[in-house]
């Protein structure tokens, strides 16, 4: 039986806070480990020696794992011994993410396999447990380092990182944990805010040895206030209901219940599964009332125009790569984003740890969720990305912070998108699949250029001359269609041949990319789209670019490249250690367009200004403060 975790009201420490139970335990920590570069072993019995001890959930390429080996490793093995006694409960073994193909055994018995490096999977191990209480899990991870047909994001296929690609991540890189449930239990929850009707759509799915007399109780609360408390019959293992909330009427009261980055109000949600008069499952979750959409050329949040100030976030850390070193590290990153004047992030080529989305929900930023790319177009690559994208959406759909889905970026994986119908049909298919699975959010079929199917037209333009950007995209006495057909940022057409701009919002979703490296620190092969030679020059160029972007009425928002330096890519506003490259309050003023005659639209409240003495993250004072 599992020890009950010590949870506070926020579900601290839980690996899946948006769907959590009290009885769970982490299997992170020290595991036996061995590389199998020749792929000699097929089953655990064949593994001859466990040569390393690895710290899970950090990939073996990272310092945090204790191994720190970034060579090519197509196969590796993990083993974990732990103690748990079998009971009449179900014990579910969860893996947050394993890159790329995983096979799992427990006590010598094969459980199954999973493909997809960014999505969770689980097994019911109840019938596989030893009566002695001594249990052994073995996992085999296959991850061909040079396979370009799998969704791999920023993981380099060359031995050493080059250009904008980074070291690889192999094997386990998110939390491994056990969860205790009854024979019949709540398997999944889907919530859909329906703001126009002041309702919460609620779908509950039941698994296990189901009976005919099951009921689900759904309780919604905000603080001490009960918003709804209803019980529904389970039919065919499912419950589908729209829960109507009392409309507060006047906007002042309505706004108290709406979620936004400026006021991230969450609604607590509790699920109870009852069989006759016995409660057999209890799940804690949350949801939010908010809507995301677009109207003509503007993005809308909760029905009002909302100017997006995003920063591109690769989601890497120097010593743990794609795995956050701690929850505090996630929270600090989000607070740095907000303190820099941004209201959101574009998570680039990475599916984040679930705890990132939890803290985005709680602390208040919006997120563009983007599928990591493959780099070849084949039948297998299309099949792989389609399957994994469905799993990504299924995992993260309930997070209110996610406002846009992005299946493709810059035609990666569909390299002939501008000219070949099969590449265009692939993007269109993923766009329509996304809109089918989630009609409540905008989708960008391919962000950057060569647009075919999209709700928002994203443009990537790294022109480092502000006056040229103004000249290109200023709409005074110019037809927008002419602008979008004339210019070719990155040498690519903005809209693919045979397609037209249908009036959707236009967002400059990548620009900037100015590299600046402190001369006192040497970064080999430092890379950026352009370079500054001093902190003062970096600041001047950042302010001038932001000045220009805020003056372009065509844009409904922007995304600056990028949040932090990441390996050789030295074009962050912050260093890899999260130190700002010029004073934080000055970054915030430029990002918000303070004094530039634009900033956010008047209908959207601005966050309070950052005081000069704000020092939330114990950073060097000379970088946090200074003339603004």
Image: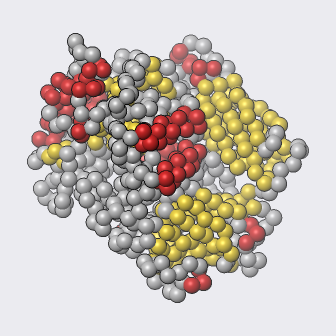
Q: Residue at x 63, y 76 (%)?
A: 136
Where residue 542 sits in the image (x, y, percent)? 19, 36
Looking at the image, which is closer to me, 577 or 554?
A: 554
* Residue 65 shows in the view: no
Q: Residue at x 26, y 47 (%)?
A: 572
Where residue 624 sits in the image (x, y, percent)? 24, 43
Q: Residue at x 49, y 44 (%)?
A: 357
Q: Quadrant of residue 253?
A: top right
Q: Is residue 428 left or right of 127 when viewed as pictured?
A: left
Where residue 569 sits in the image (x, y, percent)? 25, 53
Which quarter of the image is occupied by the N terminus? bottom right
Q: Is residue 473 left or right of 191 when viewed as pictured?
A: left
Which quarter of the image is occupied by the C terminus? top left
Farthest bottom residue in view: 48
Q: Is residue 507 above or below residue 30?
A: above
Q: Is residue 332 left or right of 598 when viewed as pictured?
A: right
Q: What count of labels does the image hold?
A: 0
Looking at the image, which is closer to me, 503 or 420?
A: 420
């Amino acid at each position: 039986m599992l020890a009950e975790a010590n949870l506070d009201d926020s579900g601290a420490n839980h690996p899946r806070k948006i769907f959590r139970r009290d009885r769970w335990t982490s299997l992170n920590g020290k595991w036996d480990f061995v590389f199998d570069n020749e792929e000699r072993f097929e089953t655990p019995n064949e593994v001859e020696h466990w040569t390393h001890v690895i710290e899970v959930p950090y990939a073996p390429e990272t310092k945090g794992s204790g191994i720190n080996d970034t060579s090519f490793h197509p196969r590796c093995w993990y083993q974990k011994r732990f103690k748990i006694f079998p009971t009449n409960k179900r014990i579910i073994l969860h893996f947050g993410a394993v890159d790329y193909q995983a096979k799992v055994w427990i006590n010598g018995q094969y459980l199954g396999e999973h493909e997809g490096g960014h999505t969770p999977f689980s097994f019911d191990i109840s019938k596989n447990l030893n009566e002695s209480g001594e249990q052994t899990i073995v996992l085999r991870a296959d991850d061909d380092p040079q396979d370009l047909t799998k969704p791999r994001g920023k993981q380099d296929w060359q031995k050493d990182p080059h250009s904008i690609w980074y070291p690889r991540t192999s094997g386990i890189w998110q939390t491994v944990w056990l969860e205790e449930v009854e024979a019949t239990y709540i398997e999944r929850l889907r919530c859909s805010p329906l703001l126009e009707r002041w309702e919460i759509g609620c779908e509950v799915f039941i698994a296990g040895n189901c009976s005919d007399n099951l009921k689900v109780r759904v309780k919604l609360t905000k603080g001490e206030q009960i918003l709804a408390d209803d019980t529904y019959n389970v039919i065919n293992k499912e419950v589908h209901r729209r829960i109507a909330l009392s409309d507060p009427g006047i906007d002042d009261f309505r706004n108290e219940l709406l979620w936004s980055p400026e006021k991230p109000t969450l609604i607590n949600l509790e699920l109870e599964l009852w069989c006759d008069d016995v409660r057999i499952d209890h799940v804690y979750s949350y949801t939010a009332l908010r809507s995301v959409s677009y109207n003509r050329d503007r993005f809308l949040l909760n029905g009002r125009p909302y100017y997006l100030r995003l920063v591109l976030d690769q989601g890497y850390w120097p010593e743990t790569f794609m795995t956050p070193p701690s929850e505090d590290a996630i929270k600090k990153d989000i607070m740095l984003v907000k303190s820099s004047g941004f209201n959101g992030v574009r998570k680039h080529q990475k599916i984040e740890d679930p705890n990132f989305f939890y803290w985005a929900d709680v602390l208040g930023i919006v997120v563009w969720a983007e599928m990591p790319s493959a780099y070849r177009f084949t039948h297998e690559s299309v099949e792989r990305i389609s399957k994994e994208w469905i799993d990504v959406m299924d995992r993260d759909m309930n997070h209110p912070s996610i406002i846009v889905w992005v299946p493709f970026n810059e035609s990666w994986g569909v390299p002939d998108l501008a000219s070949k119908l099969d590449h265009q049909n692939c993007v269109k298919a993923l766009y329509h699949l996304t809109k089918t699975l989630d009609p409540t959010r905008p989708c960008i079929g391919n962000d950057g250029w060569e647009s075919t199917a999209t709700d928002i037209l994203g443009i990537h333009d790294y022109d480092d001359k502000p006056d040229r950007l103004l000249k290109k995209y200023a709409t005074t006495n110019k037809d927008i269609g002419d602008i979008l057909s004339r210019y070719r940022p990155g040498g690519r057409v903005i809209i693919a041949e045979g397609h037209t701009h249908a009036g959707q919002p236009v967002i400059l979703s990548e620009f900037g990319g100015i590299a600046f490296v402190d001369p006192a620190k040497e970064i080999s092969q430092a890379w950026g789209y352009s370079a500054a030679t001093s902190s003062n020059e970096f600041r001047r160029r950042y302010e001038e670019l932001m000045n220009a972007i805020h003056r372009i009425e065509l844009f409904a928002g922007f995304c600056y490249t990028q949040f932090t330096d990441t390996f050789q890519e030295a074009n962050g506003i912050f260093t890899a250690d999260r130190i700002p490259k010029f004073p934080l309050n000055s970054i915030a003023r430029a990002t918000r367009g303070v004094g530039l005659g634009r900033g956010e639209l008047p209908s959207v409240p601005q966050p309070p200004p950052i005081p000069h003495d704000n020092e939330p993250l114990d950073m060097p004072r000379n970088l946090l403060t200074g003339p603004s």
